[in-house]
Amino acid sequence: MPMWLEFYQNKLANISEFFSGISLKELLDILIIAFFIYLIFLFIKKTRSTLIILGILILFLIYEASINLDLPLTKAVFKPFAGIFLIILVVIFQKELRRFLSIIGTIGFKRAALPITEQTLKTIIQAIEYFTQHRLGALIVFPGQEPLERHLEGGVILNGEISLPLLLSIFDESSPGHDGAIIIENNIIKKFAVHLPLAEDIEAVKKFGTRHRAGLGLAEVSDALVVIVSQEKGNVSIAYNKKLTSYNDIEEVKKIIQQFLEEKFPEQKIEFYKKTLKKNLKLFLLSLVISFFFWWLFFPQIAFVQKQFIVPVQFKNLPQNYVISKFSPTEVKVTFSGRESDFKLVNPQELRINLTISEPKIGWQTLKIEKDDINYPPEISPVKISAEKVDVLISKTP
């Protein structure tokens, strides 16, 4: 049997002991890692990097197989890449990593925002409907929880109350800022004439103009929702989560905006978190399993091992008028199972086999050794005893 296969079989043989002996501190450690794995899964799902991650995982498995199966050519080809793997990863996912770190920075510090009122949303929808009928281009940004400042350029601070005349005047062709975007935040127009980053996915916007490419560009690097009205076609598109979708029904556009605002800024946060957890429960359970696996696989101090100790034999409940002249064996080899870290706390001098002589008789007597007769700390447990019994010669005192 190959050594690597025997290694994993031994690991699997001890998995039940691992779960039964895990401490609260270790459980907390595993939960923290599981949470970060869960965030990575959500991030991959949101940024649609699944195929890239899958490709990297396949290369990693091939490299591991070349080491375990001793494939010299494959190992020689992949070994140089293993040394610079982290650098390659950073180069490939430079923008994604910046966004991931930004998302982590916002955890626990959700951006407070005033909810957009029904009347305000109705006004925005009226303006969008007017733009489509009169072929006026428009870019309307609804920020999510991620900060947008580093993605935006230019713009004029307005902090104006949303009204139909104001929206129509901003996107009027005679207005100097009509080609830019407006940022709606805290129920007001925070800025107008804002320049958005252009999308890198040229294929998705090849049938559209620069305004659509700018809207999709912001949706590629943030969780914002961008409403785009085409000046040429007069239709409405929504850019969100790296996708650009066109709509002909204005009521459907309103419904999507409402769903976005309810998701990003829920009024009942507890219900929202329950709903989010229920929605991603399978993903979190998968993250928990992976975290357990990594902890159990890569940290030998928590893996269960077996160690053998020579344990002396002692006797109790022997009456005063009796004495033990001889006994064999005087010491017994006992194999204990436990974690490497637990064995560091074991004092071999404290290990004892205490045999009870319930009915002493003159002459030789055989005493059976049970696991309950062994004195050992609770962190470890006996799995094998070299002798099943002890022969004792009992004599009477003069």
Image (tube, helix red, strand yellow):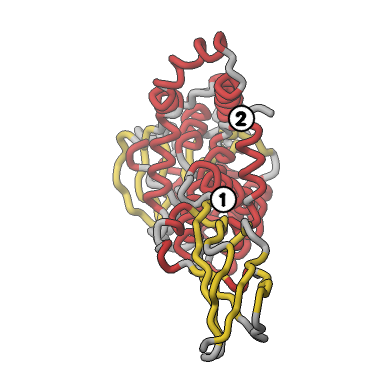
The percent position of residue 144, horizontal first and vertical second, equals 47, 50
User: Between 60 and 379, which is closer to the camera in this rendering?
Assistant: 379
- Residue hosting label 1: 292
Asked if residue 255 is positioned above or below residue 196 in the image, the reply reads below
Q: Answer with mark 2 or mark 1, whichever residue precedes in sequence.
A: 2
Asked if residue 51 is positioned above or below residue 24 in the image, the reply reads above
- Residue hosting label 2: 3
Q: Quadrant of the N terminus?
A: top right
Q: Separation of disc 2 and disc 1 at Cα?
A: 23 Å
Q: Amino acid at mark 1?
A: Phe
The percent position of residue 67, horizontal first and vertical second, equals 55, 22
Label 1 secondary element: helix
The percent position of residue 80, horizontal first and vertical second, equals 43, 14
Which residue is at 68% across, 72% downward?
A: 366
Which residue is at 48% across, 62% downward?
A: 115
Asked if residue 364 is positioned above or below residue 280 in the image, the reply reads below
